[in-house]
Amino acid sequence: MEHKKVIGLFLLVLFITLSAVTAADTTADSNSTITAANDLQSTDADVQTTSQIDNTQTSTMNIGVNYEYEDDSEINPTVTVSDSDKNKLTSTKTYDDNLDFYYVSVDHNMDESIFNVSVTAPGYIPQSQTYKLNTTKSLVFNLKASDSYKLGRTITETADKELNFASADDVLVITTAGVPKYNNQTSEDLMEAILNYAEDKVSFGKGNMIMLRQTAVDPIDTCFVVKKGNSLTAMVFNNASTKYSYLGTISEDMTKEEWNAFYKAVGGEDSYSFASIANGWNHNVTQLVLQEAGFHGHICEGTLGGFSITEALMQYYPPIQETSVPFANPGDLTSYKVLGVPGDSANDAVLFFLDATAGKSGYVGFNTTSTGANSNMIGFVRWMDGTVKYNEDTNAYEVTKPGSGTLIVMEYDSENNKKQFQEETGINPDDGTLEELKYNSWWIDRINTNPGSLVNILVEKDNLSEEDYYYLIGLNNPITYPSAVATASNAGQVRINATEAHGLDYNYILGLDLPNATRSNVVAAQGTKTYNDFKKIGKDASLLAKKYFKEELGVEIEKDMPNFEVLTTAGYTFLDQQSTAAAWDGITEVFGSRLTRETLLPNHRPMWKPLWFTFVLKQDDGQLMALYMRYNNNNGTFYVGQLNGSHINNINIETLNNSELCSQLTATAFPDGNWFNIQSLTNVWAEELQFDQFLTFLFHGHACPGVQPGFFMSEYIQENYPLSENESYFYIASSIYCKDDSIEYLLGISPGLGNYMDQKLVASDVESDYVDGATEEGVLVVWDDELKVGKAVIMNFKWATIDTSDYVTSDAKRAAQIQAYVDLYKGKINPNLKEGVTIEGTETRWITEDEYNMLKSGSGDELNAISFIQSIDNRTKDDAIRMSNANNNQSSDNGNTNTNTDDNNTNTNNNNQQNNNQQNSNNNQNTNNQNTNYNRPSSSSSSRYSSPSSSSATPNTVSVGTTAAATAALAEDTQQSNEESQETPESSESPQPNSGKAYEVSQNTPTSNNSMNILYFAGSLILVGGLAGYGFMRYRKQ
């Protein structure tokens, strides 16, 4: 290769000496030509765009690109050329395989002779050089890998040397990389390096690259597992080290001595995470469960129980759908609400599989065990919205079809299942971790053979009324009759009063006098498609897309283009009970698109949704040219969307601002009710997000301003309330909307882990008493599990003020808001941003364990989470410790201890792993308020933080057409509870609670107390402490 390059350089020098300026079509016979229309690959945000250059000529540059790791040479680099005024220039890139060089032909003004050439590639640091016409003979770029890429490459090479991937039957990689920061950057390039090195063995589509959800300040830990016959061997790298901490067996059949060695080397959390996922993978658990394990942190009885419950729900109470819709896949007429008791892993599993997240108001859960519920129960409401119409004869609005639901409560029968397992195997699953791993494997086998035996259905009731429905899930604002006919006798009058959520109130549910529901008993046929079959679906869709872009736009889509995305439901959608994730690998084969490159966007949707793909080209003029297709499973064909004969259509903000055009697009080009998901995710993708934001939007399922407060709040929490040893976050939400999904994802909390709960309060209860115009979003607790005390604080958030008066539709206004928040988070000036967000932690209180348990139980009859914290005395930490000790009459010494009683071996983990990039400190000072304003950066500062001052702008003093209230209203979801129904662009401007919105942003109204029966929690204070954190934080013994 080197001698070839020397010869090539000599020939190139001779070639350039003879003629520096050549015709654009001068190429070697062996060359392959790639045309970049409008400089399709450019991603340099500082470079401006020109639409036309007069008096142009074409010059050819000779560009060499070398990679730090030579076997990365298959990566197709992005070459961007700009003139001295930073205008991008149209270019044609031709690769000469013999000379290993690129000929880049550039159209430019005749007066221009100096150019800036930039080269980028995924996983590598961008480089720029100056090219002088008639002077520069050639440019060679020696690209250097990013820090996290180097780390990934090093540990993968080490693992391969010891484990020998080539000789393995299969390889699995589990890593916390992604969101955690490495040298102040998100660490997705670590996975990119692993995938490039082991591409024949490891991929997301194969289901053997598992990304564990972690926070930005968590350590980067990676586990490589090879399967050879019946053995599983692991190599683990902790805390971003290039030296492995463990090499040995990870099989459930290991001895207790081997487990103790593994546990001691790896640590408490990681040891069970890695072992449970590895053994589940070895037992062929479905790929969707592996993905959920990445979100939840491990595989356990609760995870498998949640999957079994979801399967039973789909069999007996599937979604009710439309019968027939022209061009479109039948849409859902119903939606699911999930009622749970946080602390059991089944909660995470169900909300993940159904896409019923808290941020979309799909999940309601706090501790209701005092009502008779238990931790492994899950309640469901299959809800169908009603209709209200105006009656001219009575001059009144009337409910022509009341909303109605089916109420189901299930449980996985832990006691009976463990009994059966012990009878069959002679093993007690509660004896220790190795026994539990074997129990998990038994569960997986039972899911594959007799899933019905694992689940009990406890309640099946029909005709649930609207009043009972909202009693369970909560209603922050009253539902009123419409007011379009202002003269109607009941126009605008309250139809259903606001109420706080009561969740899985089991006594209330049992007391409902409702008829029994009828099961559908839909038994889905088990498919027989292989990995290669699903990969082919993704490949066929990609090749078809490539054909359309060439035919309709004249554009040859290259591999590895950073400005080409593929958005798909593959990976979440099931076809005939089978995962569709392998389609990702077919897409990657054709386009090089990957999650780690932010060019493959798996859209989190429920498992029964159709399998679809959207291919989008981001052009330099800002157009987002999109092609939509749906896979038809019945005949293996694709429905390809089109409008007036054009299959590729622009879906950028300019299109969103044209309601008539959007209506036409949703009729035939994007007919499956997913227009909002597609256009919102595509437009935010075009803003080049940070990886943590990118993942959060994907988890939420769409992009909207409502997600973005969670970015600012999570960062504020981590900076102002950092965790020390033995501490963890707990959050109970009071104002619930999209931001709850981002808080969950970025803080590493969830219902299944027991450290996220939600109890929707009425709007009047969440109006901030501390920040004018803000909302009291919920209560954060930094809990010390050793001292049994916590620092509780009320989180206040005030929306930014954003001018959207240039846009006429809600979709366009919403897109403008999203862009403003993205720019604010980046510290980039946005002209529409008039005032930044304000976040303030108020009413800091040190709470005891009893008070902590009460908080998680709903806080009683006269109080809620907010007012309960306000009612606690402003004591010191030491006072709280003394009170806890007095209440418990004993000191707590609850380290993370793993004991093997049979061999008297005890391993103690102090949980002292530290991120190599950040040291956390704990501030025990009892500060009442901590306030942060995120404001538009000035030209003199790149910081997005500014200190609050008494002279801050009046919250509602903004430009014409924009108010703080309007900003919050636009942050609300545009999707109806019937997610497959299209909406008019303006339908969410002033949403009513009964419009089926997936979440609400609370508006400021007078404060009032909520109502909870104090008897509900009086008997459960002992139980609740055991529930919270059971899934991931429980101490393991073996």
Image (cartoon, helix red, strand yellow):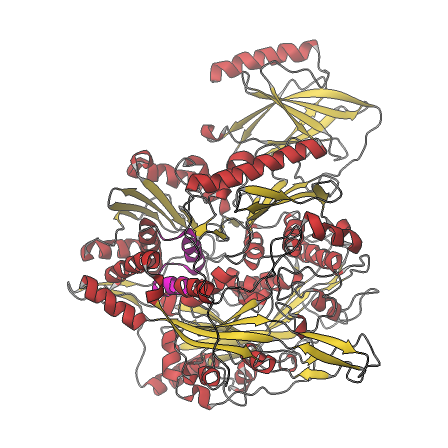
Q: Quadrant of the C terminus?
A: bottom left
Residue 439: x and y in percent read 27, 61
| Residue 160 higher or lower than 705, as above or below | above
Q: From the image, give the main secondary structure of the stretch colored magenta.
A: helix
Q: Nearer the viewer, residue 159 or 476?
A: 476
Q: Is residue 930 visible?
A: no
Residue 40: x and y in percent read 68, 35
For residue 37, what is the image quadrant? top right
Query: Is 302 one of the magenta-colored residues?
Result: yes
Q: Residue at x 63, y 47 (%)?
A: 688
Residue 313: x and y in percent read 45, 66
For residue 242, what is the image quadrant? top left
Query: Is 471 one of the magenta-colored residues?
Result: no
Residue 181: x and y in percent read 50, 52
For residue 216, side relative to residue 739 (left or right): left
Q: Nearer the viewer, residue 482 or 596?
A: 482
Q: Nearer the viewer, residue 133 or 36?
A: 36
Q: Residue at x 41, y 42 (%)?
A: 530
Q: Which residues are magenta?
A: 285-307
For residue 418, what is the image quadrant? bottom left
